[in-house]
Amino acid sequence: MATRNAFIDHNESEYQTGGTRAWMILILLSLSFMFDYIDRMVIASLLPFIKQDYNVSDRMLGALTGIVSLFIALFVLPVSLLVDRWSRRKMVSLMVLFWSLATLACAFAKDYNQLLIARAFTGLGEAGYGPAAIAIIAAAFPMESRAKASGIFDAFAPIGSGIGFLLGGYIGLHYGWRHALGIVAVPGIILACIYWFTPDYKTVPLVEQGDKSSTAFSGLGESFKGLFKIPTLWYVYLAFAMNFAVNTPMLTWLPSYFHRFHGMDEQRAGTMAGSLALLILVGAPLGGFLADRWMRTRRNARLVLSGLTSLSSAVILLAAFLLPHTVAFAPLLVCFGILSVAFLAPGQAVIQDVVHPGLRALAYGINVVILNLLGASWSPLFLGELSDRFGLDTAFLFLPLFGVLAGILFLVGSRKYERDLGRVKKVMLFEEKV
């Protein structure tokens, strides 16, 4: 029987977990994630300007967000395979560069169709970033602090969304929406160059040489087949999709809601939505921190916490839009925001927990496909269609249903976690030369 040392080159050093280097990697990944969401969500505050310039429906405006999610879903699996089998470090650098250039191209769109195509390429660039980053974080931090590190990473999504709202509203009102898209593209190009030189671990073989009894997956078909056999993953995948069917249209349409129903100009509407996003960023790291601590006494705590927070956020969201002109509205939205992202870090950690280390990016990539196809890609258009028919305020009342479904899926999945965790093969990681 082969031993775990079958692939060890004794001239190479073992990949070090934790420490200062891990935090430096996390900072760079988080900053890139922030500009991912700045580039993705700056469009939300620019929708009133684009609607006026191009004279398009709410459904067509929703497509400017939906097309990003659709292209992420279409390309995340092939990109994730490159991440797992080539290099996480190089793929992160190339992806950040690509989506930044695509965002820059949006600034030069001459009509709605060109803008839609440029937004599609933004989604293509962002396709594999989440899987790559989560795989890198999972390797850089020990298991007991994995959810906490993922939570810090996740917190930069609402930070990016908030900054995107603020910049879009301000720059769009004073200088034009094209300038807003051009300006936010520049920092990503710089970060892409920096990340090329960060440390990473070597690509992990899926099967050990000479180990005929190994249960690791031996090829692409076997990899998918093996992942399909992990029940925990599928409950988590579907729960992510349902939560994104709530959060994505919320991020897309909230500035327009403030503009239409609370009498705010575009800058103030973007500022209000951005301020809310910045206030709720506590939810992602808090969810990871609480899940890690609770896991000391309850093994499946990450999924139970995700289920409870998803259910609670759905109830609070419904209450908020039933009381839109009362003093309770803003506090309810803040509470919703905190709870609505608390599932991210625990859910991401669970996906990494229950799969072979050589399949971490692919496993999370499948999650990205499902959450985008079944959650993020259609929901902004769906809300836009409801808005065209019934009004944007009424349309928001349909969203809590998806949050309830997410909560139920997480809680059912929590019953499968311990068994799936016990089946994971232990693999030693080694440094990749920069």
Image: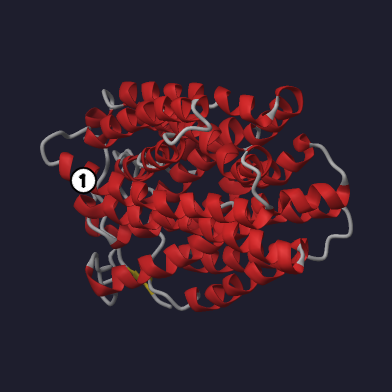
Is 416 on the left-hand or right-hand side of 351?
A: left
Left or right: 390 as drawn, with respect to 32? right
Viewer-closest of 428 and 124: 124
Q: Residue at x 43, y 70 (%)?
A: 28
Q: How many marks?
A: 1
According to the image, label 1 marks what residue? Answer: 292
Q: Between 325 and 122, which is closer to the camera in this rendering?
A: 325
Considering only vertical position in the picture, is 315 above or below 269? above
Q: Would residue 114 be found to the left or right of residue 29 on screen?
A: right
In the rendered image, residue 392, in percent from the top left (x then y), is placed at 66, 31
Q: Secondary structure at mark 1?
A: helix
User: Residue placed farthest to the left in the image?
Assistant: 297
Q: Nearer the viewer, residue 303 or 94?
A: 303
The answer to which image quadrant residue 63 occupies is top right
Residue drawn at x 17%, y 34% as measured from the top left: 299
Question: Residue 412: x, y in percent?
Answer: 33, 21
Q: Name which quarter of the figure residue 9 lies in.
A: bottom left
Residue 325, percent from left and from top? 53, 33
Q: Note whether 299 is above or below 136 in the view shown.
A: above
Inspect the image, locate mark 1, and give the three-letter code of the amino acid beneath it: Asp
Residue 231: % across, % down: 37, 26
Q: Is residue 141 left or right of residue 299?
A: right
- Residue 208 is at least partly visible in this image: no
The residue drawn where x is 54% and y is 27% is 399
Q: Residue at x 59, y 42 (%)?
A: 254
The scheme the figure's colours follow is secondary structure
Residue 377 can be seen, yes or no: yes
**Quadrant location of the C terminus in the rendered image:** bottom left
Question: Dot 1: few (<14), some (14–19), or many (≥20) neighbours within 10 Å?
Answer: many
**The image quarter in which residue 93 lies:** bottom right
